[in-house]
Image (cartoon, grey):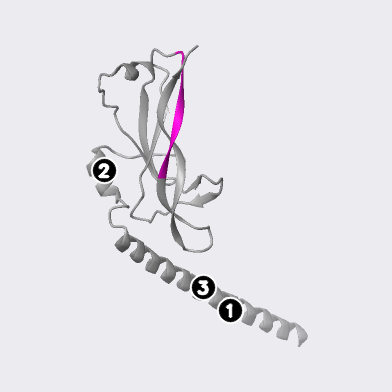
């Protein structure tokens, strides 16, 4: 009799946990959708869909190690001297997390169908310079204040945006 009562208790407890989990998932999903609508309405030109990005860049997306796409764009030559010293390869990334200027990791806001585009360059070794080093600039991105609360906030991040020649 005791085994049956314990078994019934375990089943009831399991069902209760399952219902609580489902209710929590629905609440989180509803809150997420409300935040998404609010953010997309408030900042209409901040996010791009995959179609918009492919139209802008006219290329297929390259999948990177993250689950968001990376776009590599052919470098346009302006025929300037510095292009021959330290050529760059510009990319546009959609990173999940970036470290802000205060050293805190912030989750960058992206949605399943809309992304913030983060410019990024890497230095090429094909130039006339003995060594090229990437240099950072500060950009502003919309990020979640932390990973658990859905509070959007603009934050400052340092990303590589150009290259300089290091004389040998």
Whole-Å distance between the Cαs marked 2 and 1?
46 Å
Name the residue that disc number 3 marks: 24
Q: Is residue 66 visible?
A: no
**Magenta region:** 130-139
Residue 95: % across, % down: 44, 45
Whole-Å distance between the Cαs marked 3 and 2?
36 Å
Q: Which mark is residue 15?
A: 1
Q: Which residue shows up at 40% across the image and 43% down it?
A: 139
Crowd around label 3: few <14 · some 14–19 · many ≥20 (10 Å): few
Q: Is residue 108 above or below residue 80?
A: below
Crowd around label 1: few <14 · some 14–19 · many ≥20 (10 Å): few
Q: Which mark is residue 54?
A: 2
In terms of sequence position, does the residue under pointer 1 or pointer 3 come before the other?
1
- Say which quadrant the N terminus sits in: bottom right
Residue 84, picture quadrant: top left
Q: Secondary structure at mark 1?
A: helix
Residue 166: % across, % down: 47, 18
Principal secondary structure, stretch drawn in magenta: strand
Q: Is residue 52 above or below residue 127?
A: below
Q: Which residue shows up at 29% across the image and 51% down it?
A: 49
């Amino acid at each position: 009799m005791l085994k049956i009562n314990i078994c019934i208790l375990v089943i009831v407890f399991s069902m209760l946990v399952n219902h609580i989990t489902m209710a929590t998932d629905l609440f989180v999903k509803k809150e997420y959708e409300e935040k998404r609508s609010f953010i997309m309405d408030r900042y209409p030109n901040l996010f791009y869909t995959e179609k918009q990005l492919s139209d802008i860049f006219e290329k297929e997306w390259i999948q990177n190690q993250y689950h968001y796409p990376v776009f590599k764009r052919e470098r346009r030559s302006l025929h300037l001297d510095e292009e021959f010293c330290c050529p760059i390869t510009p990319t546009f990334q959609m990173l999940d997390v970036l470290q802000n200027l205060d050293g805190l990791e912030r989750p960058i806001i992206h949605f399943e169908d809309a992304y913030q585009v983060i410019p990024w360059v890497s230095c090429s070794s094909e130039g006339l310079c003995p060594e090229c080093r990437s240099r950072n600039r500060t950009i502003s991105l919309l990020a979640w204040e932390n990973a658990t609360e859905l509070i959007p906030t603009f934050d400052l991040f340092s990303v590589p945006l150009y290259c300089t020649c290091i004389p040998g």
